[in-house]
Amino acid sequence: MTGTITRLKRLLGGRSGDGAPSSVADLLSRESLAAAYLRGSGIEIGALQNPLKVPAEASVRYVDRLSRDQLRLQYPELNGCPLVEVDLIDEGERLSTLGDGSQEFVVANHFLEHCQDPIGAMKNMVRVLRPGGVAYLAVPDKRFTFDHDRPTTTLDHVVRDRREGPAWSREMHFVEWVRHVEPTFGRVYSTEEAVAGRVAELMKMDYSIHFHNWTTAEAVELIGHCVGVERLPVFVEVFVSMGPEMIFILRRR
């Protein structure tokens, strides 16, 4: 951690009229980490109403699987929130419209848990990075979210999603969502028939739930597996746990 703080101070020093941030808390924020590590042209996946504030040296395009108007229909709870304009309609897990090595950075904040194949999604994020490019990932810690009552996703589960495809576990995740998450939003289902009906409705909508959820330990294990076993050509530049979320900054070799 000391090395990370020293590097951030060096990168951020003198950038603004107020000088470098004066405390560790100031240094280890989403915005300060973005200011230190994001340059050139890149993308942010699934920004919706909460895009990352990027420095002037960075130009970002927004990627989502639906247009902004379609996203409003799928997420009526975001009515009244300003949503970013979607520049590229693409599945964030695949990024099939983007060429290999075409981006200087990829931002994916609170996106990995929405992925049905997180390892495959990570591979595609790295695929589109140029050498030296950065993947900036914020991952929620389930203990601080509406996922707190759900079973924590194990590494074995995610590896199986990669090897066999995610279809084997898709319905199970929707059942977990309906039983453990929707009650926090006031939706309570008293019978198994009601649960099954709601699951079928969400699956037909292709609603983007949290398919997976992790605490800090499991998230670190997943990233370590991607680097060490899946041989993603990246190294971990920064890892910060900030209570409700973890931030990983990965640099392509």
Image (spheres, rainbow, N blue to C red):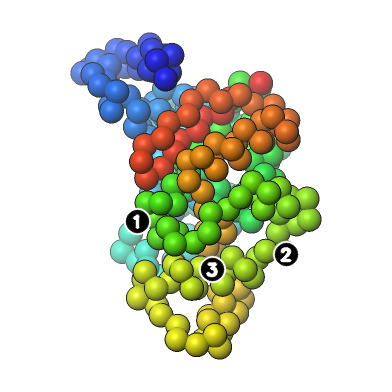
> Could you classify mark 1 by the number of other residues whose Cα lies within 10 Å: few (under 14), some (14-19), or many (20 or more)?
few
Tag 3's secondary structure? helix
Instruction: Estimate the spatial distance between the alpha carbons at disc 1 and disc 3, rounded to whole Å.
Output: 30 Å
Residue 19 falls left or right of residue 158: left
Which of the labelled discs sits on residue 149, or is there none? none
Q: How many marks?
A: 3
Q: Nearer the viewer, residue 78 or 208?
A: 208
Residue drawn where x is 61% and y is 50% of the image:
154
170 lies above or below 12: below
Quadrant of image for the N terminus: top left
In terms of sequence position, does the residue under pointer 1 or pointer 3 come before the other?
A: 1
Which numbered dot is residue 168?
Answer: 2
Q: Which residue is mark 3?
A: 176
Q: At label 1, which amino acid type do we have?
A: Pro
Amino acid type of the residue tagged 3 in the rendering? Glu
Q: Is residue 121 above or below residue 165?
A: above
The residue to which callout 1 is attached is 82
Residue 26: % across, % down: 28, 27
Q: Please state which of residues 59 and 22 is positioned toward the viewer in this rendering.
A: 22
Quadrant of the image for the C terminus? top right
Res 186 quadrant in image: bottom left
Residue 41, position as x, y percentages in the image? 53, 31
Cβ atoms at labels 2 and 1 below 8 Å apart: no
- Marks 2/1: CA–CA distance: 36 Å
Q: Amino acid at mark 2?
A: Trp
Asked if disc 2 and disc 3 are in contact, CB closer than 8 Å, the reply is: no
Question: The residue tagged with tag 2: helix, strand or loop?
Answer: helix
The residue mark sitting in front, 2 or 1, is 2
Q: Quadrant of residue 35?
A: top left
Q: In the current view of this chain or complex, which residue is farthest to the left?
A: 18
